[in-house]
Image: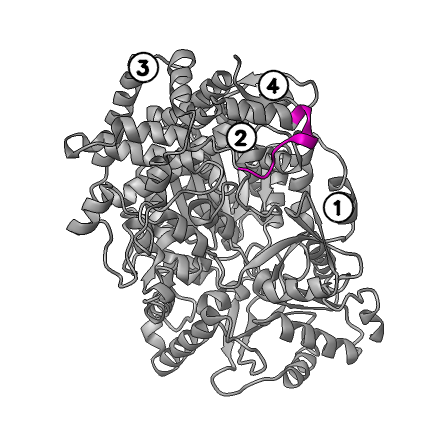
Amino acid sequence: MEFIAHIRERDGEIQSVEEHLLAVKQIAESIGMKMGVPHIAGLAGMLHDLGKYTKEFRNYIWTAVNDPKNAQRKGSVDHSTAGGKLLYEMYHKDKKTSIFSLLAEIVGNAIISHHSYLKDYIDLELNSEFLKRVRKSDLLEFSLSKEQFFEKVIKQAEFKQYVNHAAQELQDFLKKDKNISNEEKCMFLTKYIFSALVDGDRTNTRLFEENKNYQPVENHNELFQEYYKKVLEKIDNFKNSNNNNSPINILRKEMSEQCDQFGERPDGIYTLSIPTGGGKTLASLRYALKHAILHNKKHIIYIVPFTTIIEQNAEEVRKILNDNANILEHHSNLIEDNYDDENEDGIMGANQKLKLAKDNWDSPIIFTTMVQFLNVFYANGTRNIRRMHNLAESVIIFDEVQKVPTSCVSLFNHALNFLKSYGQSSIVLCTATQPALDFVEHKLAINKDAEIISQMEEVIEAFKRVNIIDLASEHSFDNVRLASFIEERLVDITSMLVILNTKTVVKKLYELLKVKRLDIPIYHLSTSMCPFHRKEILEEVRELLEQKRKVICISTQLIEAGVDVSFECVIRSLAGLDSIAQAAGRCNRHGEMGIKQVYVVDHIEENLDKLPEIKIGKVEARTVFKEIDKNPESFGGNILSEKAMNRYFQGFYQQFATKLNYSLPQYNTNLIDLLMAGRNKNGQLKGYNATSKEKFSLMLSNSYGTAAKHFEVIDQVTTTVLVPHKEGEEIIADLNGNHSIEDLGGSLRRAQQFSINIFSYEKEQLIKSDGLVYYFEGKITVLKEGFYNEEYGLDLSGESGYSFLQF
């Protein structure tokens, strides 16, 4: 009897269980090699679908494909428990063999969870979903599964030898880096093995469906060498330009060369504090390519703030490298990452195609967001964590790292420390305003002498292009007063950027200025607009700026990071000092206008109750402004000095001290405790007292599943929605058709440019107004025609195309 893993949709070809298990084992081993754990990862690969060696699953998949009307789709055909159960029964024993017990827990959890998410070893109610699964007694054909496995996949004696190798790898893994606890090491290792298994399983299934052979991720060293030559050519072109000998250009050249030299250093966590306008993108790319070539890195990954636009940085790199094919932009997850249905494994339907669509960050150069980076390590489901292993052996550049959400600071630090110690990755924190991430309780393990740029204070002074004028300490502004102030300033200046803290006040100020009919082009920017729409607006604004024509742009803080624009004057609503510094970077960006003004105002119409980070940032920034006013010499008279920034961030993090570990007050605990060891409702460690040890007999007590269910990078849950703007209409129509897996992956990547994130209350309102439609059995959410405005973006009223006529 042949046992079936998958049946190909187009020709009915069968993939046997042994073919699938051995292929996934091979892929998982290659992924595990990056961490020095090929046998641990391979063990998960060869056991994950052990439960398909049953008559029940064979009958189920055969009927589902050949006679779908009579298929039993409602009952569960559990094929993921058997592999974890086998490991548990063979190797989870007494303390004398504790390393094998630990191995069975780590690998077993990945196996039983590969259609859902990692299970709690012990949860907040002192139950164990892990033990419930591996001790499952109603696997009626478990003996048959084991018999077939040891007959067709690997002989039992070879299997035991393979497990011995895996146990040795685990021992070696735990010995490394004594500064990290074993609980934390096991947490990240379990997630890494889970990542290797999920990607290996989906990759092999996709390749079988496409009738292709597996090709290991190629070494991009030759490509990176080509890129490096192009970067040097670009720098040579700058040298030959007319302004090459200007002081700013000389300094840019020096900083770029320092980045090149720093690329020779070993892996670590470093800082790159190039001021705005200092050529940060080109310099960081030069470092990344040099380091990747010398240290054989697989990927270069740029992580930008979740509140900003990433297209510009990606486009800039594309132009420098003259390459579109090998640079991936990953903005958001368009697909709802609910649990997979085990019943659909092996059957090619809409959900299975979405699951298999290539989405694993295997491109040479990747641009993504802080939200997506943190989701890889901590979010629920299988789509995010599938990408985790590709963060290993990489150069990772965090652009504007000061934007790490405060609740995620400790989680962020732990992830980076792991990538440094175990992932053979080099990490660069790239910003003009370095946050004090080594000041908090769970410190970031930044290398000694980490700063790439020497003589920072001199560099900051040399790049001074603006005066920061504090109007917030003495006055307050509403939109009426602010509009009048803007009119007054426009008498003397040509271009103005106004950055406010909320979408509501941005829209109201924009409407107020439009009513005034100033006979000046006025533009509106907010996250209610899809990335492609914002890009269109910015291109129009840049054209006017280059022509030195009058223009006003009213924006939320999305314009502060990663957007190359240069206005003659900037008005910034009071916020954190880092935000003020970023806003200043949009004024007189290249020093072409002498010294210009950035006005900081206190806008009283902004409701910041749901934006605590901005609210606290305002308080701390105001404190530093007052201290400088009383004693200018204490900070060198510069609100943007290194001392001022350190003072600001220390005060800021002190205000959030109880929340930096992602607190869960409803359970009297936090995510750090759940992930690193687990705690009960009273905050006490679980699994370490005599009673619970006797009850559970587990090496680990981490609560992975519970932590993931409660994790959101931003406080308010959002849904990604595809919008019908320009090419977005074609993509929506295209997604509604029939696709190959490869074509679907391409459409999903293009669709990211035409998506927005909506909050829960917005989603509820759209549902009431019948403004949403769902594709792929509810996995992809699409905004209907009439609910997207060509001026503002999302239109909850459903009357887009009409509201702008009032102007």
Q: Residue at label 2? A: 202
Q: Position of residue 694 (x, y in %)?
A: 19, 45
Q: Is residue 394 visible?
A: no
Q: Residue at label 1? A: 732
* Closer to us: 237 or 100: 100
The answer to whether 561 is drawn above or below residue 478 in the figure is: above
Q: Earlier in the sequence, mark 3 or mark 1?
A: 3
Q: Position of residue 674 (x, y in %)?
A: 32, 53
Q: Earlier in the sequence, mark 2 or mark 4?
A: 2
The answer to whether 452 is drawn above or below residue 517 in the figure is: above
Q: Earlier in the sequence, mark 3 or mark 4?
A: 3
Q: Residue at label 3? A: 156
Q: Quadrant of residue 109?
A: top left
Q: Residue at label 4? A: 212
Of marks 3 and 1, the one in the foreground? 3
Q: Are marks 2 and 1 in contact (CB under 8 Å)?
A: no
Distance from disc 2 to disc 1, alpha carbons, whole Å, reads 25 Å
- Coloring scheme used: one colour
Distance from disc 3 to disc 1, alpha carbons, whole Å, reads 51 Å
Distance from disc 3 to disc 4, alpha carbons, whole Å, reads 31 Å
Q: Position of residue 134 (x, y in %)?
A: 35, 35
Quadrant position of the C terminus in the picture = bottom right
Distance from disc 4 to disc 1, alpha carbons, whole Å, reads 28 Å
Distance from disc 2 to disc 4, alpha carbons, whole Å, reads 13 Å
Q: Earlier in the sequence, mark 4 or mark 1?
A: 4
